[in-house]
Image: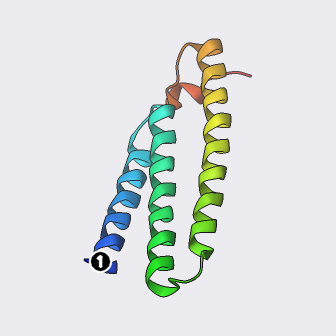
Amino acid sequence: MNDIPLTHILFVSTALFFIGMYGLFTRRNMITMLMSIELMLNSVNINFVAFNKYLYPNQLNGIFFTIFIITIAAAEAVVAIAIIINLYRSHHSIDVEDAGEMKW
């Protein structure tokens, strides 16, 4: 069986995390920022699965953490999309800079 080295997996995970961080800090659209946060969470999931496979191959702790993070990310996405839809309905914009000018 041809295994991928741990360093390659960690490189991909780090690249995904920093792409997500770049997207979070440079974008003004709330949906793009939400996608960037999800990308960062998925890079953490890759780390959990990789370390579980290489350090503790007979245990499922990393897999359980990954399933837990996926569940939390799904709930976070639902709440964030509901907030974004509500802001768009009331202010006709999902730009972050416009949110600072909104009066509640």
Question: Residue at horizontal 66%, vertical 27%?
Answer: 82
Question: Residue at horizontal 32%, vertical 65%?
Answer: 12
Write down the residue under mark 1. 3
The answer to which quarter of the image holds residue 78 is: top right
Front residue of 86 and 13: 13
For the C terminus, give its image quadrant. top right
Q: Is residue 46 above or below residue 80?
A: below
Q: Amino acid at mark 1?
A: Asp
Identity of the residue furthest to the front in this view? 1
- The percent coordinates of residue 27 (x first, y second) are 40, 38
- The percent coordinates of residue 84 (x first, y second) are 60, 27
Horizontal side of 56 relative to 74 (left or right) equals: left
Front residue of 71 and 44: 71
Element type where label 1 sits in the image: loop
Front residue of 92 and 101: 92
Q: Is residue 102 above or below residue 31?
A: above
- The percent coordinates of residue 30 (x first, y second) are 51, 33
- The percent coordinates of residue 2 (x first, y second) are 25, 77
Q: Is residue 73 above or below residue 47?
A: above
Horizontal side of 48 relative to 12 (left or right) equals: right
Front residue of 18 and 77: 77
Horizontal side of 19 relative to 52 (left or right) equals: left
> How many labels, in total?
1
